[in-house]
Image: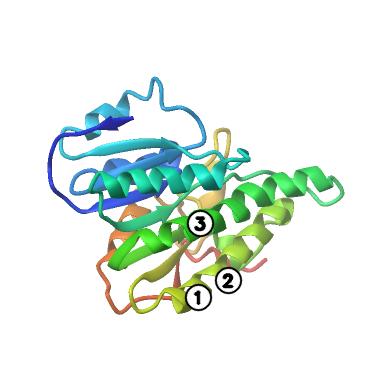
């Protein structure tokens, strides 16, 4: 589905641009970017996207990590965008889950599901997107502060993010000098429903949680920093420096 205002602006792809941080990032970037937004589910009923088209082109795609046809679907969609004249000058891979999986509850199926969405899917998206990015582009990946200090009740998730952390410098070397690669290790910006934001904030040096605007600023900073690549920017309020 495409919502098109006809404006000629830089185009970015947001993988996972439908919920929570992805939506916040889409709403911020839509002010001055054309956007390709992906989701694992159909976009029917997502009326908030219509508002974004008042300033730029918006294309919505369905990329489902569970689909056996994922890779061919991504390649076909990117071919179509290229044919239609979309020049992709940036991409942010936001998609992921945050499952609680305590030690002792792990199964082969649960581990595979966690790692498919939080590790395998971003790898495949990066592989599909990188050759389509124009020279000077920045490919950005959302990680987690758990790469510094694992979530003990979410170790499979933390391990997946640690794997993504190794992708950042690796891709930076493979794609240089045409494309830069930057990661974002985030603390709590949007607490899950039912979470105690006050307690979560107390586990940081700043004694508060973050805000989606922190991510938006960091993504724009990375995109506008032509000498930055292979690095992971951490925004966790100093969580990793709090005594255990």
Question: In the rendered image, which quarter is residue 56 located in?
Answer: top left
Q: Helix, strand or loop at disc 2?
A: helix
Residue 133 percent coordinates (x, y): 34, 61
Q: Nearer the viewer, residue 126 or 100?
A: 126
Q: Are marks 2 and 1 in contact (CB under 8 Å)?
A: yes
Q: Name the residue at 27% across, 37% down.
A: 58
Q: Residue furthest right?
A: 104
Residue, disc 1: 169
Residue, disc 2: 166
Residue 70 percent coordinates (x, y): 55, 43
Sequence-earlier tag: 2 or 3: 2
In this rendering, the answer to whether 145 lies above or below 94 is below
Q: Residue furthest left?
A: 7
Quadrant location of the C terminus in the rendered image: bottom right
Kindly report which numbered mark, 2 or 3, lies closer to the viewer in this rendering.
2
Whether residue 161 is visible: yes
Q: Helix, strand or loop at disc 1?
A: helix
Question: In the rendered image, which quarter is residue 23 located in?
Answer: top left
Kindly report which numbered mark, 3 or 1, lies closer to the viewer in this rendering.
1
In this rendering, the answer to whether 148 lies above or below 213 is below
Q: Would you call the spot at circle 2 few (<14 residues within 10 Å), some (14-19), or many (20 or more)?
A: few
Residue, disc 3: 187
């Amino acid at each position: 589905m495409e919502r098109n205002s006809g404006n000629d602006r830089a185009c970015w792809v947001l993988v996972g641009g439908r919920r929570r941080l992805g939506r916040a990032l889409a709403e911020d970037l839509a002010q001055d970017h054309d956007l390709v937004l992906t989701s694992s589910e159909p976009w029917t009923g997502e009326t908030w996207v219509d508002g974004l088209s008042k300033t730029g082109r918006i294309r919505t795609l369905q990329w489902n990590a569970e689909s056996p046809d994922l890779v061919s679907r991504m390649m076909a969609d990117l071919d179509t965008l290229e044919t239609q004249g979309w020049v992709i000058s940036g991409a942010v891979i936001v998609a992921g889950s945050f499952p609680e999986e305590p030690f002792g509850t792990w199964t082969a199926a649960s581990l595979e599901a966690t790692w498919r969405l939080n590790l395998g899917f971003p790898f495949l998206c990066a592989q599909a997107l990188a050759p389509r990015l124009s020279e000077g582009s920045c490919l950005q990946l959302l990680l987690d502060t758990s790469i510094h200090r694992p979530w003990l009740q979410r170790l499979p998730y933390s391990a997946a993010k640690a794997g993504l952390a190794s992708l950042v410098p690796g891709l930076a070397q493979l794609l240089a000098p045409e494309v830069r690669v930057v990661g974002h290790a985030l603390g709590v910006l949007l607490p899950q429903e039912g979470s105690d934001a006050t307690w979560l904030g107390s586990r940081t040096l700043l004694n508060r949680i973050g805000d989606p605007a922190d991510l938006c600023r960091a993504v724009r900073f990375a995109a506008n920093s032509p000498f930055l690549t292979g690095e992971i920017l951490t925004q966790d309020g100093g969580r990793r420096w709090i005594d255990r």
